[in-house]
Amino acid sequence: MPFSRFSRRHALTLFAAAAAASSAHAQAPVRGPSRTASPAADGAAAAPAAPALRHPVFVLNSLDANVSVIDPVTWTEKERIPTGKEPHHLYLTPDEKSLIVANALSDSLTFLDPRTAEVQRTVRGIVDPYQLQFSPDMKWFVTAANRLNHVDIYRWDGKDLTLAKRISTAKTPSHLYINSKSTTVYSSMQDSDELVAIDMATQTIKWRTKTGPMPADVYLAPDDRTLFLGLTGGDGVEVFDVGGAEPKSIRKIPTGKGAHAFRSAGDGRYLFVSNRVANTISKIDMQTQQAVESYPAPGGPDCMDLSADGRYILVTSRWARKLTVIDTQTKQVVRQVNVGRSPHGVWTLDHARR
């Protein structure tokens, strides 16, 4: 969430920071936005295990306007690449040749090579791109303008973006999800406690519905009708049936305070959610719609990625300035790497299927 807005979300931020303080390690020194080497991870030499990756891990430092590049062999931060202000989320292009970093306060996108971490280009004039997603048919690129209360739909020709429609929504559009047929965009509205569905054919809002407090990330199950919504202002995940003409709230799954971001296990059945205030990650069975496992995740866990074998969760510890690696078999933190201030998005090319 942007730090330029002061609202009830700010109070939750302070509460989460206090809750995380007891478990957070010492903070990494603040570094300027320069492309230079950084200190090694805390206790890197003594860490008992880590996923075997071939490509770099990228962590977005929202308050430092840069990206940490983590060496997947030594598990140390190699460099920090300057971006625009407030990089929060990132997404791979359909051809897998570029990793797009969305810089909300700079109205820009930074394209990185996902294999070498080289900067490819900067695209300007993308207004307030807080969250972003490509449609599965690869024709559309959608952004949520978190500060400015609109969702933008861009045409994508494989290289360039052209604005097709700017859709006024409600207060603070946050996270997006597009169904498998590329016909509907779902977006949460954090400050008006709503879920909105946008029809891609007409590029208009087809319905909106009230949700639990402070909805954040959205995940649509493979059946294209069961939608999971993280309630950052609550203590769990709200489940909707969106298969009919009107949505129906069907269940709330208790997971932990500050349920926020999702990452699928890649098997079509299980879903991870980070509980930012509770300092845990829960594993949800999407078939039974119950939380079946819980893992410790210190420092205000936020965005996640998952190793290709599904064993390790890579999660940003938002209040501790860390990338944290969790072994799901032992349910232990096995590695932490110092990064920048307010780390948010995390991604590696060596990940499990989404």
Image (tube, rainbow, N blue to C red):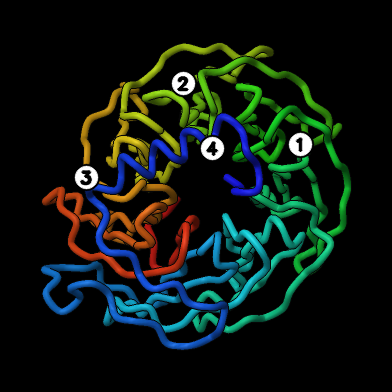
Q: Left of 336 or right of it: where is 2?
A: right
- Pointer 3 and pointer 1: residues touching (CB < 8 Å)? no
What distance separates the C-alpha of mark 3 from that of mark 4? 24 Å
The residue at the far bottom in this view is 36
- Pointer 2 and pointer 4: residues touching (CB < 8 Å)? no
What distance separates the C-alpha of mark 2 from that of mark 4? 25 Å
Dot 1 corresponds to which residue? 149
Of callouts 3 and 1, the N-terminal one: 1
Mark linked to residue 239: 2
x and y, in percent, of residue 316 in the image: 39, 56
- Indicate the secondary structure of the residue bearing disc 3: strand
x and y, in percent, of residue 180 in the image: 60, 39
Dot 4 corresponds to which residue? 10
Count residues near mark 1 (Cα–Cα under 10 Å), then give few for <14, some for 14-19, many for 20+.
some
Of callouts 3 and 2, the N-terminal one: 2
Kind of residue at disc 4: His
